[in-house]
Image (cartoon, rainbow, N blue to C red):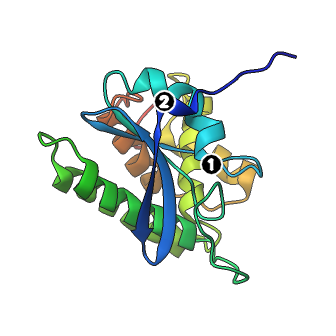
Amino acid sequence: MGTHVVDRSAWRNRYYDVAGICAHSIEAGTGETLVLVHGALAWCCAGLTSGAVLGPLSRTMRVVAVDLPGYGTTETRGARVWTAAEPGALLIAWLRQLGAVLAHPDAEPARVRRALDELAALVAAMAGEDANVNWETLRLLADELWNFTDGRRTIADVADAIGFEFGLRIRPDHLAALARGLERVGALTLEATSSQGTL
């Protein structure tokens, strides 16, 4: 098994006050901002997850890799257990702050805030159908959209399959809203059908 040494001189450490939490990120480069968010495995943090790509990516843009609450050197809230929605809400607040502070001068922070507001509304609507839905569900759904995309399945088919696989009540129109957001950034293409779209 090989080893990989990450060059820590490729980034600088930054700290932000986000909703009373001392939040840590590693950052490099200038220009339009790309934010990298690590996963939820026990070893995850900005440096281990994104450190190797920070240098190459930062040649053409500003790259910000964040430590989520309780990971890396971002504070948690002591012994108090987070609710399912709190880490996502803190991340959204942090993204808003990064958009205001770090956005490229030619960027449109209002567009970023609008997209975040749309995601918040989507999570709230989905949670109204199924109390087990939270911000993490969006990542799961986005991953599964990739897995099920074959040009034949409809949004309704995928919503049913994901719901069956994970025990969630996923409405096709909610999944379609997420898919349309991914389509706007070029991640997938929808074809119009009577069932919200074909992937």
Residue ID for mark 1: 160
Quadrant into which the N terminus falls: top right
- Type of the residue with mark 2: Ala
Does dot 2 land on a helix, a strand or a loop?
Answer: helix
The answer, for residue 127, to whether it is visible in the render is yes
Residue toward you, 5 or 197:
5
Query: Measuring 20% from the left and 41% from the top, which residue is drawn there?
Result: 104
Label 2, residues with CA under 10 Å away: few <14, some 14-19, many ≥20? some
Vertical position of residue 23 compared to residue 109: above or below: below
Q: Residues within 10 Å of mark 1 (few under 14, many from 20)?
A: some
Task: Please state if 180 lies on the left or on the right of 175 as rendered.
Answer: left
Percent coordinates x, y for residue 42 in the rendering = 77, 52
Q: Is residue 162 left or right of residue 19?
A: right
Instruction: Identify residue for label 2.
Output: 10
Q: Quadrant of residue 190?
A: top left
Q: How many marks?
A: 2
Q: Which mark is residue 78?
A: none
Viewer can see residue 193: no
Q: Residue at x 45, y 20 (%)?
A: 56
Residue at 73% across / 53% down in the picture? 166
User: Where is residue 37 drawn, in percent x and y?
Assistant: 53, 46
- For the residues labelled 1 and 2, the Cα–Cα distance comes to 45 Å
Nearest to viewer (mark 1 / mark 2): 2
